[in-house]
Image: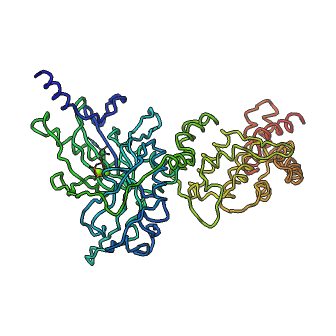
């Protein structure tokens, strides 16, 4: 009996299964002998037109303060909440994408605290029965195996108002525009083991929320904010006491906060007189963005008592299977499926896939009065470029080589946009124009060098003009010996005339080089073929990138050697 009691006691003393046993502990050289445990609470603003419980429109950060406010948002007595079902659907999209168990019944609670940005004195949240439980998000990092992070729960809640303090006039200003906007709090289990894994988790989550349209996930603008929980323990020992760092608004700051917290907690534990029994005091901390350090906000002892209670004005949120099924059916391709498709179907390298997905995960759709092809995202643009161009007389379009397309997109198009300090959303080249450009280079109507010049010109001068026409106007048609096959029938007549001219111009340039470099020509005639490179270089320079080096070499050989 006694032995049985002891066994039970020993079992109850085992740490709760916080750790993912599937993952083998790997020592981090930055903190040898220590294991780091991180769990993240992410607050993502729901991208709905109206607030969670009122008719008021949601707002963007720069808008005139206190212009998006109903009496309910301002907490006038007697006003009642009405749940916005659009917000529920958007949160469900995130929950389905994160493979959560969606709860058929969930409910709302009041979390009380007194602060100037909370007009009613309580926030409506889902403390006891959240909308979704037990999900999963797989995290891939270049060079590391993919690992799962368990999602503990997703709860719906209200955002607060915004307070700003002017130290000169010692005045606080309250803007109620944000008060009552719908938030999803997405809580991870403590499955992350390093600052880098934490960064990858937030980026992946951001990409999923954006892909399903649940949230902008914009950390700079505050539509995605993280509270990060960090603890350290000696390898083989139970997890340590967590400290929670509140309100981090960039992945960089979050990683810096974790790094600082690890060293702070280690110092406490290493300097304790009895390392076996030492613990870190449980605290809620802030992050100082200038010193890159965390600082104490409050300890567990002064933790507020939120006096949670069910909100009597809101009933139970009941969800039926049909609604969830409909959400499931309308979800777009999720980032990990896109990743697999790009590498399986197109044979793209990991790096190229990363670049295309990174563009889309950081994508902000801009509305400047015209919806361009780039607005659908880099992957969609790439898909359409590969799908190819319609060829006369053929019912199916001629597909483009994905490797050629991805090179043009990642190196040239993204590279030149970056040089112009623009993002992919600023690219106004239609898929058709970009495709024509690639075709012109592929069928040697223009050289690769001219292709890059052409792209630069087209990015600088937005127009709907077909690419061939711009190439002709800029006199970029390649100087070749033979006529190239035109890339579209409409341009065929003009291009073949141009290529005849081009071929005679190339001959003229070679002739000029032969006259300009008589010593080199004599050396080539004597059999010193290396000198030919110098003459080729001379022609290439004179052609301003329009000549193909191979064609020039062949023509020079013909002119110098065969006509001795
Ligand atoms: N030992 C630990 N080390 C690091 N993180 C931990 C540890 N134990 C739990 N966590 C993480 O702490 C977070 C707890 O969040 P949760 O929302 O459940 O509670 P809370 O922080 O107490 O409440 P509130 O929402 O009011 O901040 C989770 O992300 C969880 O993974
Ligand atoms: Mg929480
Ligand atoms: Mg918390």
- Taking the spot 15% from the left edge, 22% from the top edge, the residue there is 4
Residue 251 at x, y = what percent? 39, 50
| 280, above or below 419, in the image | above
Q: Position of residue 451 (x, y in %)?
A: 71, 49
Residue sticking out furthest to the bottom = 169
Residues 391 and 261: in front is 391
Q: Position of residue 193 (x, y in %)?
A: 33, 38
Q: Position of residue 78 (x, y in %)?
A: 33, 73
Task: Judge by depth and name the residue closer to the eye, 30 or 27.
Answer: 27
Q: How many marks on residues?
A: 0
Q: Is residue 85 visible?
A: yes
Q: Quadrant of residue 36?
A: top left
Of the pair 304 and 492, the residue shown nearer to us: 304
Q: Is residue 354 left or right of residue 550?
A: left
Q: Is residue 274 above or below residue 468?
A: above
Q: Is residue 535 visible?
A: no
85 vs 484: above or below: below
- Which quarter of the image is occupied by the C terminus? top right
- Out of 478 and 331, give the one closest to the viewer: 331
When asked about the image quadrant of residue 182, the answer is: bottom left
């Amino acid at each position: 009996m006694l032995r049985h009691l002891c066994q039970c006691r020993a079992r109850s003393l085992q740490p709760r299964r916080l750790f993912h046993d599937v993952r083998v502990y790997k020592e981090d050289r930055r903190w040898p002998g220590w294991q780091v445990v991180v769990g993240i609470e992410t607050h993502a603003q729901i991208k709905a037109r109206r607030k969670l419980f009122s008719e008021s429109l949601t707002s963007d950060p720069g808008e005139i303060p206190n212009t998006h406010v109903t009496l309910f948002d301002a907490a006038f007595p007697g006003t009642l909440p009405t749940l916005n079902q659009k917000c529920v659907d958007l949160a469900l999209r995130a929950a389905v994408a994160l493979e959560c168990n969606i709860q058929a019944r969930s409910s709302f609670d009041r979390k009380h605290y007194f602060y100037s940005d909370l007009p009613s004195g309580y926030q409506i949240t889902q403390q006891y029965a959240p909308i979704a439980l037990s999900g999963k998000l797989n995290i891939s990092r270049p060079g590391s195996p993919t690992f799962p992070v368990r999602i503990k729960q997703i709860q719906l809640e209200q955002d607060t108002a915004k307070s700003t303090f002017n130290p000169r006039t010692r005045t606080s200003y309250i803007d109620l525009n944000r008060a009552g906007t719908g938030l999803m709090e997405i809580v991870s289990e403590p499955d992350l083991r390093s600052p880098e894994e934490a960064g990858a988790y937030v980026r992946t989550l951001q990409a999923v929320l954006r892909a399903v349209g649940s949230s902008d996930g914009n950390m700079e603008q505050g539509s995605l904010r993280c509270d990060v929980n960090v603890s350290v323990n000696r390898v083989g020992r139970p997890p340590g006491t967590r400290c929670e760092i509140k309100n981090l608004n960039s992945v960089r700051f979050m990683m810096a906060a974790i790094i600082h917290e690890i060293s702070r907690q280690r110092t406490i534990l290493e300097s304790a007189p009895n390392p076996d029994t030492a613990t870190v005091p449980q605290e809620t901390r802030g992050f100082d963005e200038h010193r890159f350090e965390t600082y104490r906000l409050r300890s567990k002892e002064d933790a507020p008592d939120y006096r949670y209670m069910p909100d009597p004005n809101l009933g139970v949120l009941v969800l039926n299977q049909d609604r969830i099924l409909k959400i499931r059916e309308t979800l777009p391709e999720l980032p990990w499926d896109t990743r697999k498709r790009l590498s399986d179907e197109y044979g793209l390298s990991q790096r190229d896939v990363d670049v295309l997905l990174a563009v889309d995960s950081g994508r902000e759709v801009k509305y400047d009065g015209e919806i361009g092809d780039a607005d659908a995202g880099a992957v969609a643009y790439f898909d359409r470029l590969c799908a190819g161009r319609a060829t006369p007389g053929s019912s199916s379009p001629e597909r483009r080589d994905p490797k050629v397309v991805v090179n043009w997109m990642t190196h040239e198009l993204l590279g030149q946009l970056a040089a112009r300090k623009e993002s992919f959303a600023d690219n106004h080249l239609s898929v058709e124009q970009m495709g024509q450009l690639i075709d012109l280079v592929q069928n040697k109507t223009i050289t690769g060098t001219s292709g890059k010049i052409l792209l630069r010109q087209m990015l600088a001068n937005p127009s709907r003009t077909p690419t061939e026409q711009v190439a002709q106007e800029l006199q970029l048609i390649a100087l070749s010996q033979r006529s190239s096959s035109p890339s579209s029938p409409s341009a065929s007549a003009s291009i073949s005339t141009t290529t005849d001219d081009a071929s005679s111009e190339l001959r003229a340039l070679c002739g000029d080089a032969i006259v300009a470099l008589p010593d080199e020509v004599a050396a080539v005639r004597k059999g010193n073929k290396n000198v030919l490179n110098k003459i080729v270089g001379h022609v290439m320079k004179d052609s301003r990138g329009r000549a193909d080096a191979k064609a020039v070499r062949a023509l020079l050989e013909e002119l110098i050697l065969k006509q001795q």
